Image (cartoon, rainbow, N blue to C red):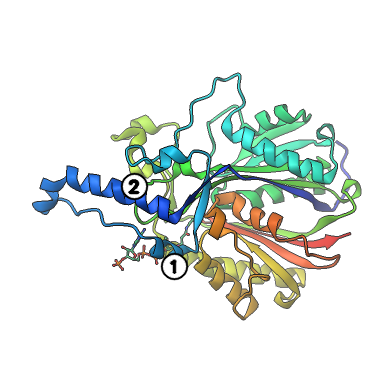
Amino acid sequence: MESTALTRPVISATGLWTPPHSISNAELVQSYNAWADTWNRENEAEIKSGLMEPKTHSSVEFIEKASGIKSRYVVNKDGVLDPDIMAPRLPERPNEQISILAEMAVHAAREALKKAGRDPKDVNAVICAASNMQRAYPAMAIEVQDALGIEGFAFDMNVACSSATFGIQTAADFIRSGNAKSVLVVNPEICSGHLNFTDRDSHFIFGDVATAVLVEAEDIAPKQHWKILGTKLKTQFSNNIRNNFGFLNRTAPEGVGAPDKLFVQEGRKVFKEVVPMVAEMITAHSSELGIPAGELKRMWLHQANANMNRLISSKVLGHEASDEESPTVLDTYANTSSAGSIIAFHKHSDDFRAGDKGLICSFGAGYSAGTVFVEKVG
Ligand code: COA
Protein backbone atom coordinates (compact mmCIF):
# COMPACT_ATOMS: atom_id res chain seq x y z
CA MET A 1 0.00 0.00 0.00
CA GLU A 2 1.26 3.47 -0.85
CA SER A 3 2.60 5.55 2.01
CA THR A 4 0.49 8.54 3.08
CA ALA A 5 2.43 10.58 5.61
CA LEU A 6 1.06 10.56 9.15
CA THR A 7 -2.45 9.24 8.64
CA ARG A 8 -4.27 9.55 11.97
CA PRO A 9 -5.31 6.22 13.52
CA VAL A 10 -8.65 5.90 15.29
CA ILE A 11 -10.60 3.18 17.05
CA SER A 12 -13.71 2.58 14.94
CA ALA A 13 -15.40 -0.02 17.16
CA THR A 14 -14.89 -2.74 19.74
CA GLY A 15 -16.43 -6.19 20.26
CA LEU A 16 -16.80 -8.56 23.19
CA TRP A 17 -17.54 -12.27 23.48
CA THR A 18 -18.36 -13.66 26.92
CA PRO A 19 -18.37 -17.42 27.58
CA PRO A 20 -21.73 -18.84 28.68
CA HIS A 21 -20.54 -20.28 32.02
CA SER A 22 -19.82 -18.27 35.15
CA ILE A 23 -18.21 -19.54 38.37
CA SER A 24 -18.88 -17.71 41.65
CA ASN A 25 -16.26 -17.41 44.38
CA ALA A 26 -18.37 -19.73 46.56
CA GLU A 27 -18.37 -22.47 43.88
CA LEU A 28 -14.64 -22.10 43.27
CA VAL A 29 -13.77 -22.16 46.97
CA GLN A 30 -15.96 -25.21 47.55
CA SER A 31 -14.11 -27.22 44.90
CA TYR A 32 -10.67 -25.95 46.04
CA ASN A 33 -11.44 -26.88 49.66
CA ALA A 34 -12.64 -30.34 48.62
CA TRP A 35 -9.41 -30.82 46.64
CA ALA A 36 -7.32 -29.60 49.63
CA ASP A 37 -9.10 -31.97 52.03
CA THR A 38 -8.40 -34.93 49.73
CA TRP A 39 -4.76 -33.86 49.33
CA ASN A 40 -4.38 -33.60 53.12
CA ARG A 41 -5.92 -37.07 53.57
CA GLU A 42 -3.65 -38.59 50.93
CA ASN A 43 -0.57 -37.01 52.51
CA GLU A 44 -1.62 -37.52 56.13
CA ALA A 45 1.52 -39.44 57.17
CA GLU A 46 3.94 -36.86 55.71
CA ILE A 47 1.93 -34.01 57.24
CA LYS A 48 1.92 -35.69 60.68
CA SER A 49 5.66 -36.32 60.52
CA GLY A 50 6.24 -32.66 59.60
CA LEU A 51 7.59 -33.44 56.12
CA MET A 52 4.73 -31.58 54.44
CA GLU A 53 2.59 -28.57 55.30
CA PRO A 54 -1.16 -29.21 55.15
CA LYS A 55 -3.16 -27.26 52.56
CA THR A 56 -5.31 -24.61 54.24
CA HIS A 57 -8.77 -23.64 53.02
CA SER A 58 -9.43 -20.80 50.61
CA SER A 59 -12.16 -18.31 51.42
CA VAL A 60 -14.74 -16.18 49.61
CA GLU A 61 -14.09 -13.24 51.94
CA PHE A 62 -10.33 -13.25 51.28
CA ILE A 63 -10.77 -13.39 47.52
CA GLU A 64 -13.15 -10.47 47.39
CA LYS A 65 -11.12 -8.35 49.80
CA ALA A 66 -7.75 -9.08 48.14
CA SER A 67 -8.90 -8.72 44.53
CA GLY A 68 -12.45 -7.35 44.11
CA ILE A 69 -13.32 -10.51 42.15
CA LYS A 70 -16.75 -12.06 42.77
CA SER A 71 -17.06 -14.40 39.79
CA ARG A 72 -15.43 -15.26 36.47
CA TYR A 73 -16.55 -16.61 33.07
CA VAL A 74 -14.92 -19.79 31.80
CA VAL A 75 -15.09 -21.84 28.61
CA ASN A 76 -15.43 -25.06 30.64
CA LYS A 77 -16.98 -25.07 34.10
CA ASP A 78 -17.27 -28.78 34.95
CA GLY A 79 -13.54 -29.58 34.71
CA VAL A 80 -12.51 -26.53 36.72
CA LEU A 81 -14.97 -27.33 39.52
CA ASP A 82 -14.33 -31.09 39.63
CA PRO A 83 -11.93 -31.66 42.57
CA ASP A 84 -10.50 -34.66 40.67
CA ILE A 85 -9.65 -32.54 37.61
CA MET A 86 -9.17 -28.86 38.62
CA ALA A 87 -8.63 -27.72 35.00
CA PRO A 88 -10.78 -26.93 31.97
CA ARG A 89 -11.57 -29.97 29.87
CA LEU A 90 -12.00 -29.02 26.22
CA PRO A 91 -11.95 -31.80 23.64
CA GLU A 92 -9.09 -31.37 21.17
CA ARG A 93 -10.42 -30.33 17.78
CA PRO A 94 -9.35 -31.77 14.44
CA ASN A 95 -7.13 -29.50 12.31
CA GLU A 96 -10.02 -29.05 9.88
CA GLN A 97 -12.11 -27.33 12.56
CA ILE A 98 -11.49 -23.78 13.78
CA SER A 99 -9.54 -23.69 17.07
CA ILE A 100 -11.36 -22.61 20.24
CA LEU A 101 -9.22 -19.50 20.67
CA ALA A 102 -9.78 -18.35 17.08
CA GLU A 103 -13.51 -19.08 17.34
CA MET A 104 -13.80 -16.86 20.43
CA ALA A 105 -11.90 -14.10 18.64
CA VAL A 106 -14.17 -14.37 15.58
CA HIS A 107 -17.28 -13.82 17.77
CA ALA A 108 -15.79 -10.62 19.25
CA ALA A 109 -14.48 -9.49 15.84
CA ARG A 110 -17.88 -9.88 14.17
CA GLU A 111 -19.41 -7.51 16.72
CA ALA A 112 -16.70 -4.87 16.15
CA LEU A 113 -17.00 -5.15 12.34
CA LYS A 114 -20.79 -4.91 12.51
CA LYS A 115 -20.68 -1.87 14.76
CA ALA A 116 -18.25 -0.14 12.41
CA GLY A 117 -20.26 -1.19 9.33
CA ARG A 118 -17.02 -2.64 7.94
CA ASP A 119 -16.99 -5.38 5.31
CA PRO A 120 -14.23 -7.88 6.22
CA LYS A 121 -12.97 -7.54 2.63
CA ASP A 122 -11.93 -3.98 3.47
CA VAL A 123 -9.84 -5.00 6.48
CA ASN A 124 -6.13 -5.23 5.66
CA ALA A 125 -4.65 -7.06 8.65
CA VAL A 126 -5.44 -9.09 11.77
CA ILE A 127 -3.32 -9.09 14.92
CA CYS A 128 -4.07 -11.68 17.58
CA ALA A 129 -2.61 -9.99 20.67
CA ALA A 130 -3.05 -12.27 23.68
CA SER A 131 -1.33 -14.02 26.60
CA ASN A 132 -2.58 -17.54 26.35
CA MET A 133 -2.01 -18.80 22.82
CA GLN A 134 -3.47 -22.16 21.87
CA ARG A 135 -0.50 -23.40 19.85
CA ALA A 136 2.76 -22.37 18.22
CA TYR A 137 1.60 -22.14 14.58
CA PRO A 138 -0.10 -21.56 12.22
CA ALA A 139 -0.97 -18.24 13.86
CA MET A 140 -4.44 -17.96 15.39
CA ALA A 141 -4.61 -14.54 13.70
CA ILE A 142 -4.38 -16.23 10.27
CA GLU A 143 -7.17 -18.60 11.28
CA VAL A 144 -9.32 -15.59 12.28
CA GLN A 145 -8.42 -13.89 9.00
CA ASP A 146 -9.50 -16.99 7.09
CA ALA A 147 -12.76 -17.43 9.04
CA LEU A 148 -13.76 -13.83 8.38
CA GLY A 149 -12.65 -13.71 4.75
CA ILE A 150 -10.07 -10.96 5.27
CA GLU A 151 -7.32 -10.44 2.70
CA GLY A 152 -3.86 -9.06 3.51
CA PHE A 153 -1.81 -10.40 6.43
CA ALA A 154 -2.15 -11.61 10.01
CA PHE A 155 0.11 -12.57 12.91
CA ASP A 156 0.10 -13.35 16.64
CA MET A 157 1.86 -11.34 19.30
CA ASN A 158 2.16 -11.97 23.02
CA VAL A 159 2.96 -9.30 25.57
CA ALA A 160 1.03 -10.99 28.41
CA CYS A 161 -1.61 -8.76 30.06
CA SER A 162 -0.41 -5.78 28.01
CA SER A 163 -0.99 -7.48 24.66
CA ALA A 164 -4.05 -5.37 23.74
CA THR A 165 -2.37 -1.98 24.04
CA PHE A 166 0.76 -3.30 22.30
CA GLY A 167 -1.54 -4.60 19.56
CA ILE A 168 -3.33 -1.24 19.30
CA GLN A 169 -0.03 0.65 18.97
CA THR A 170 1.21 -1.84 16.36
CA ALA A 171 -2.03 -1.44 14.40
CA ALA A 172 -1.89 2.36 14.82
CA ASP A 173 1.68 2.35 13.46
CA PHE A 174 0.53 0.41 10.37
CA ILE A 175 -2.08 3.13 9.84
CA ARG A 176 0.34 5.98 10.56
CA SER A 177 2.86 4.60 8.07
CA GLY A 178 0.25 3.94 5.40
CA ASN A 179 0.82 0.18 5.40
CA ALA A 180 -2.83 -0.52 6.23
CA LYS A 181 -6.14 1.33 6.46
CA SER A 182 -8.06 -1.08 8.66
CA VAL A 183 -6.53 -3.44 11.23
CA LEU A 184 -8.45 -5.84 13.42
CA VAL A 185 -6.83 -6.50 16.82
CA VAL A 186 -8.30 -9.48 18.69
CA ASN A 187 -7.62 -10.55 22.28
CA PRO A 188 -9.00 -14.05 22.95
CA GLU A 189 -7.99 -15.37 26.36
CA ILE A 190 -8.48 -18.87 27.79
CA CYS A 191 -6.73 -17.89 31.02
CA SER A 192 -8.32 -20.86 32.80
CA GLY A 193 -6.08 -23.18 30.76
CA HIS A 194 -3.00 -21.59 32.35
CA LEU A 195 -4.25 -21.13 35.90
CA ASN A 196 -3.23 -23.51 38.68
CA PHE A 197 -6.59 -24.18 40.34
CA THR A 198 -4.76 -26.05 43.14
CA ASP A 199 -2.79 -22.95 44.19
CA ARG A 200 -4.77 -21.22 46.96
CA ASP A 201 -2.95 -17.89 46.49
CA SER A 202 -3.97 -17.50 42.84
CA HIS A 203 -6.76 -20.01 42.00
CA PHE A 204 -9.34 -17.20 41.89
CA ILE A 205 -7.51 -14.69 39.71
CA PHE A 206 -8.42 -15.37 36.07
CA GLY A 207 -11.37 -15.76 33.71
CA ASP A 208 -11.91 -16.38 29.97
CA VAL A 209 -13.19 -13.93 27.35
CA ALA A 210 -12.45 -12.43 23.91
CA THR A 211 -12.35 -8.80 22.82
CA ALA A 212 -11.76 -7.09 19.48
CA VAL A 213 -10.64 -3.56 18.55
CA LEU A 214 -10.91 -2.20 15.02
CA VAL A 215 -8.12 0.34 14.43
CA GLU A 216 -8.53 2.35 11.22
CA ALA A 217 -7.42 5.39 9.26
CA GLU A 218 -9.47 8.46 10.20
CA ASP A 219 -10.62 9.01 6.60
CA ILE A 220 -12.45 5.64 6.36
CA ALA A 221 -13.74 5.47 9.97
CA PRO A 222 -17.46 5.59 10.78
CA LYS A 223 -18.81 8.98 11.92
CA GLN A 224 -18.64 7.97 15.58
CA HIS A 225 -15.15 6.83 16.54
CA TRP A 226 -12.29 7.36 18.97
CA LYS A 227 -9.36 9.50 17.89
CA ILE A 228 -6.09 7.98 19.15
CA LEU A 229 -4.29 10.95 20.71
CA GLY A 230 -1.15 9.04 21.63
CA THR A 231 0.21 5.58 22.42
CA LYS A 232 3.18 4.58 24.58
CA LEU A 233 4.65 1.18 25.48
CA LYS A 234 7.11 0.11 28.18
CA THR A 235 8.76 -3.12 29.28
CA GLN A 236 11.08 -3.86 32.17
CA PHE A 237 12.25 -7.42 32.89
CA SER A 238 10.88 -9.12 36.00
CA ASN A 239 10.58 -12.74 37.16
CA ASN A 240 7.68 -11.91 39.48
CA ILE A 241 4.98 -13.06 37.02
CA ARG A 242 5.93 -16.09 34.96
CA ASN A 243 4.44 -18.89 32.94
CA ASN A 244 7.06 -21.35 31.68
CA PHE A 245 4.64 -23.18 29.43
CA GLY A 246 6.29 -23.66 26.06
CA PHE A 247 7.22 -26.00 23.31
CA LEU A 248 10.33 -27.40 25.04
CA ASN A 249 8.31 -28.56 28.05
CA ARG A 250 9.38 -32.18 27.96
CA THR A 251 12.97 -31.26 28.82
CA ALA A 252 11.82 -30.32 32.33
CA PRO A 253 11.99 -33.18 34.88
CA GLU A 254 8.31 -32.91 35.78
CA GLY A 255 7.21 -32.17 32.22
CA VAL A 256 4.02 -30.41 31.24
CA GLY A 257 2.31 -30.89 34.62
CA ALA A 258 4.90 -28.97 36.66
CA PRO A 259 3.46 -25.95 38.54
CA ASP A 260 5.87 -23.53 36.82
CA LYS A 261 4.28 -24.44 33.46
CA LEU A 262 1.23 -22.50 34.62
CA PHE A 263 0.78 -18.93 35.90
CA VAL A 264 2.91 -18.18 38.98
CA GLN A 265 3.48 -14.84 40.64
CA GLU A 266 4.95 -13.04 43.61
CA GLY A 267 1.71 -11.13 44.08
CA ARG A 268 2.91 -8.67 46.72
CA LYS A 269 6.07 -7.76 44.77
CA VAL A 270 3.97 -7.29 41.62
CA PHE A 271 1.66 -4.98 43.52
CA LYS A 272 4.51 -2.89 44.96
CA GLU A 273 6.54 -2.60 41.76
CA VAL A 274 3.86 -2.29 39.07
CA VAL A 275 1.66 0.36 40.74
CA PRO A 276 4.33 3.14 40.77
CA MET A 277 5.65 2.12 37.34
CA VAL A 278 2.19 2.46 35.74
CA ALA A 279 1.18 5.62 37.64
CA GLU A 280 4.43 7.34 36.57
CA MET A 281 3.99 6.20 32.98
CA ILE A 282 0.43 7.57 32.77
CA THR A 283 1.43 10.88 34.33
CA ALA A 284 4.45 11.32 32.04
CA HIS A 285 2.49 10.40 28.89
CA SER A 286 -0.46 12.66 29.76
CA SER A 287 1.82 15.65 30.38
CA GLU A 288 3.69 14.92 27.13
CA LEU A 289 0.33 15.04 25.30
CA GLY A 290 -0.77 18.16 27.22
CA ILE A 291 -3.75 16.37 28.79
CA PRO A 292 -3.95 17.19 32.52
CA ALA A 293 -5.42 14.38 34.67
CA GLY A 294 -8.45 16.61 35.36
CA GLU A 295 -9.31 16.51 31.64
CA LEU A 296 -9.62 12.72 31.64
CA LYS A 297 -13.22 11.64 31.94
CA ARG A 298 -12.29 8.01 32.46
CA MET A 299 -9.43 5.54 32.81
CA TRP A 300 -10.12 2.03 31.53
CA LEU A 301 -7.39 0.25 33.45
CA HIS A 302 -6.17 -3.30 33.13
CA GLN A 303 -8.36 -5.43 35.36
CA ALA A 304 -5.96 -7.41 37.54
CA ASN A 305 -6.83 -6.35 41.01
CA ALA A 306 -9.22 -3.75 42.46
CA ASN A 307 -6.75 -2.52 45.07
CA MET A 308 -4.03 -2.00 42.44
CA ASN A 309 -6.42 0.00 40.27
CA ARG A 310 -7.56 2.08 43.24
CA LEU A 311 -3.96 3.01 44.03
CA ILE A 312 -2.92 3.71 40.42
CA SER A 313 -5.93 5.91 39.73
CA SER A 314 -5.56 7.88 42.96
CA LYS A 315 -1.85 8.50 42.23
CA VAL A 316 -2.78 9.80 38.77
CA LEU A 317 -5.89 11.81 39.72
CA GLY A 318 -4.76 13.02 43.15
CA HIS A 319 -7.97 11.70 44.71
CA GLU A 320 -9.81 8.39 45.14
CA ALA A 321 -11.35 7.55 41.74
CA SER A 322 -15.12 7.15 41.45
CA ASP A 323 -16.61 4.21 39.55
CA GLU A 324 -17.23 6.69 36.70
CA GLU A 325 -13.56 7.69 36.59
CA SER A 326 -12.17 4.15 36.86
CA PRO A 327 -14.82 1.50 36.22
CA THR A 328 -14.28 -2.14 37.15
CA VAL A 329 -15.35 -5.36 35.48
CA LEU A 330 -13.35 -7.48 37.92
CA ASP A 331 -16.43 -8.36 39.93
CA THR A 332 -17.99 -10.34 37.07
CA TYR A 333 -15.07 -11.11 34.70
CA ALA A 334 -12.05 -11.40 37.09
CA ASN A 335 -8.64 -10.82 35.50
CA THR A 336 -8.95 -11.62 31.79
CA SER A 337 -5.34 -10.72 30.97
CA SER A 338 -5.02 -8.66 27.77
CA ALA A 339 -8.79 -8.26 27.40
CA GLY A 340 -9.51 -6.55 30.75
CA SER A 341 -9.03 -2.90 29.84
CA ILE A 342 -10.86 -3.46 26.53
CA ILE A 343 -13.90 -5.01 28.29
CA ALA A 344 -13.98 -1.96 30.59
CA PHE A 345 -13.73 0.36 27.55
CA HIS A 346 -16.37 -1.59 25.61
CA LYS A 347 -18.87 -1.67 28.48
CA HIS A 348 -18.29 1.78 29.97
CA SER A 349 -17.94 4.29 27.14
CA ASP A 350 -21.45 4.83 25.72
CA ASP A 351 -21.94 8.00 27.79
CA PHE A 352 -18.95 9.75 26.14
CA ARG A 353 -19.68 12.89 24.08
CA ALA A 354 -17.59 14.44 21.34
CA GLY A 355 -14.42 15.90 22.85
CA ASP A 356 -14.44 13.72 26.01
CA LYS A 357 -11.05 12.12 26.64
CA GLY A 358 -10.11 8.83 28.24
CA LEU A 359 -7.22 6.44 28.74
CA ILE A 360 -6.94 2.72 27.98
CA CYS A 361 -4.08 1.32 30.06
CA SER A 362 -2.74 -2.18 30.49
CA PHE A 363 0.02 -3.70 32.61
CA GLY A 364 1.28 -7.12 33.52
CA ALA A 365 3.97 -9.75 33.07
CA GLY A 366 7.26 -8.77 31.54
CA TYR A 367 6.78 -6.35 33.26
CA SER A 368 4.92 -4.59 30.47
CA ALA A 369 2.62 -1.58 30.29
CA GLY A 370 0.85 0.39 27.57
CA THR A 371 -1.12 3.65 27.45
CA VAL A 372 -3.57 4.67 24.72
CA PHE A 373 -5.17 8.13 25.09
CA VAL A 374 -8.41 8.53 23.13
CA GLU A 375 -10.95 11.27 22.36
CA LYS A 376 -14.55 10.66 21.33
CA VAL A 377 -15.53 11.97 17.90
CA GLY A 378 -19.06 12.24 16.46
N1 COA B 1 -7.97 -17.74 50.78
C1 COA B 1 -7.75 -17.39 52.04
N2 COA B 1 -6.59 -16.85 52.46
C2 COA B 1 -5.63 -16.67 51.55
C3 COA B 1 -5.79 -17.03 50.20
C4 COA B 1 -7.03 -17.59 49.82
N3 COA B 1 -7.30 -17.95 48.55
N4 COA B 1 -4.65 -16.75 49.54
C5 COA B 1 -3.82 -16.20 50.43
N5 COA B 1 -4.38 -16.17 51.65
C6 COA B 1 -3.83 -15.68 52.91
C7 COA B 1 -2.33 -15.90 53.00
O1 COA B 1 -2.05 -17.18 53.49
C8 COA B 1 -1.91 -14.80 53.95
O2 COA B 1 -2.14 -15.21 55.28
P1 COA B 1 -1.09 -14.84 56.46
O3 COA B 1 -1.08 -13.32 56.50
O4 COA B 1 -1.71 -15.49 57.62
O5 COA B 1 0.21 -15.40 56.00
C9 COA B 1 -2.88 -13.65 53.64
O6 COA B 1 -4.01 -14.26 53.01
C10 COA B 1 -2.27 -12.63 52.72
O7 COA B 1 -1.73 -13.31 51.58
P2 COA B 1 -1.05 -12.59 50.39
O8 COA B 1 -0.78 -13.56 49.28
O9 COA B 1 0.12 -11.83 50.88
O10 COA B 1 -2.30 -11.68 49.98
P3 COA B 1 -2.39 -10.24 49.39
O11 COA B 1 -3.29 -9.45 50.24
O12 COA B 1 -1.08 -9.68 49.00
O13 COA B 1 -3.20 -10.57 48.05
C11 COA B 1 -2.86 -10.92 45.73
C12 COA B 1 -2.71 -11.49 47.11
C13 COA B 1 -2.22 -11.85 44.70
C14 COA B 1 -4.35 -10.82 45.42
C15 COA B 1 -2.19 -9.54 45.73
O14 COA B 1 -0.86 -9.62 46.15
C16 COA B 1 -2.26 -8.91 44.37
O15 COA B 1 -3.30 -8.60 43.89
N6 COA B 1 -1.17 -8.66 43.73
C17 COA B 1 -1.21 -8.04 42.42
C18 COA B 1 -0.82 -9.02 41.42
C19 COA B 1 -1.83 -9.34 40.36
O16 COA B 1 -2.99 -9.08 40.43
N7 COA B 1 -1.29 -9.94 39.34
C20 COA B 1 -2.03 -10.40 38.23
C21 COA B 1 -1.23 -10.33 37.00
S1 COA B 1 -1.04 -8.65 36.42
Q: Quadrant of residue 64?
A: bottom left
Residue drawn at (79%, 64%) of the image = 352
Quick check: can you spot residue 239? Answer: no
Is the residue at mark 1 in contact range of ligand 1, meaning its CB lies under 8 Å from it? yes
116 left or right of 52? right
Which quadrant of the figure contains the N terminus? top right
Q: Which residue is mark 2?
A: 198
Counting from the top left corner in percent of width and height, residue 343 is at 65, 53
Q: Earlier in the sequence, mark 1 or mark 2?
A: 1
Q: Nearer the viewer, residue 78 or 338?
A: 78
Counting from the top left corner in percent of width and height, residue 325 is at 67, 71
Label 1, label 2: how far apart the Cα atoms are: 20 Å
Q: Which residue is mark 1?
A: 65
Regarding mark 1 in the picture, which secondary structure is present there? helix
Residue type at the position of mark 2: Thr
- Dot 1: within a 10 Å radius of its alpha carbon, few (fewer than 14), some, or many (20 or more) residues? few
